[in-house]
Image: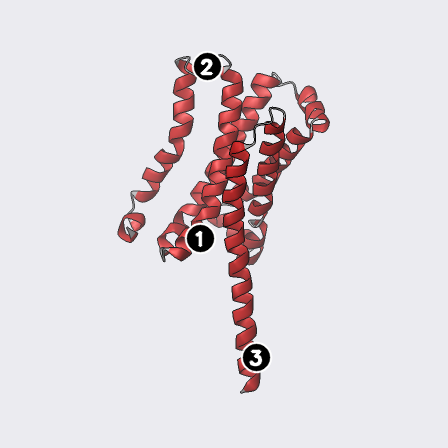
């Protein structure tokens, strides 16, 4: 498994796999297989895949630690960029199919509807993360600042979940919302646990050094 993940072809294969949902949506749109309301389907589907990729990105570190597979870390930035790819697709679908690319109406809609505002804010916060997902950007801003900046993904996850919740509230359909909420809660809970374990270990080490 580790050898496969370290193989030079691993990243190209993952790239193709990440593109498959978009390719399927594109093909289905061309062949008229998206149901009675294809525009709404595309808006919802690109939003769903954005949230799924957020969950995948958040899962990389726990899986890497639990499975003792450090090779997984090399895929995190690519997966993060696919989060941005799908959120841009989601925003473009909404701007095109719902608003006809009318910038004035889009601004009014963002200000008027809270769930649109929350979703747009998630997009805004994702933009600097995508822009800094390159080695040159990491060198420019410094590793510590880069790590701090990319903690915004936790905020994005919360905003994305809230956006999804408010969108489903109109139809009183929360089944999928609860699934995503549970997944995100487990992933963030694991990180919180690791943080406190690390803090406890550092405190124990400091007490041991003081006792010497």
Q: Residue at x 52, y 17 (%)?
A: 39
Residue 190 percent across, percent down from the top left: 50, 54
In the image, residue 29 above or below residue 197: above
Residue 74 percent across, percent down from the top left: 39, 49
Residue 199 percent across, percent down from the top left: 56, 67
Which residue is the site of mark 1?
Answer: 62
Q: Residue at x 63, y 31 (%)?
A: 166
Real-space Cα distance between discs 2 and 1? Answer: 38 Å
Q: Residue at x 53, y 59 (%)?
A: 193
Residue 147 percent across, percent down from the top left: 54, 54
Which residue is the site of mark 2?
Answer: 35
Q: Earlier in the sequence, mark 3 or mark 1?
A: 1
| Residue 207 numbered mark, or none | 3
Res 31 → quadrant: top left
In the image, residue 91 above or below residue 132: above
SS of the residue at dot 1?
A: helix
Graded by Cα atoms within 10 Å as few (under 14), some (14 to 19) or many (20 or more), the crowding at tag 1 reads some
Res 159 → quadrant: top right
Task: Determine if residue 137 is in view.
Answer: no
């Amino acid at each position: 498994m580790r050898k496969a993940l370290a193989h030079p072809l691993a990243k190209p294969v993952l790239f193709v796999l990440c593109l498959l949902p978009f390719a399927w949506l594109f093909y289905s749109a061309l062949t008229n297989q998206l149901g009675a309301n294809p525009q709404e389907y595309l808006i919802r589907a690109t939003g769903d895949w954005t949230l799924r990729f957020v969950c995948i990105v958040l899962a990389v570190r726990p899986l890497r630690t639990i499975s003792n597979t450090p090779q997984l870390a090399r895929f995190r930035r690519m997966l993060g960029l696919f989060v941005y790819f799908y959120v841009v697709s989601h925003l473009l679908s909404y701007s095109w199919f719902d608003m006809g690319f009318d910038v004035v109406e889009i601004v009014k809609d963002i200000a008027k509807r809270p769930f649109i505002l929350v979703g747009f804010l998630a997009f805004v916060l994702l933009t600097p993360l995508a822009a800094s997902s390159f080695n040159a950007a990491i060198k420019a801003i410094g590793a510590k600042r880069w790590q701090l900046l990319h903690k915004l993904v936790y905020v994005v996850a919360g905003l994305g979940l809230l956006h999804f919740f408010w969108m489903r509230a109109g139809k009183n359909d929360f089944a999928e919302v609860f699934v995503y909420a549970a997944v995100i809660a487990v992933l963030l809970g694991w990180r919180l646990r690791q943080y406190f374990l690390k803090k406890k270990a550092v405190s124990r080490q400091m007490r041991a050094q003081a006792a010497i």
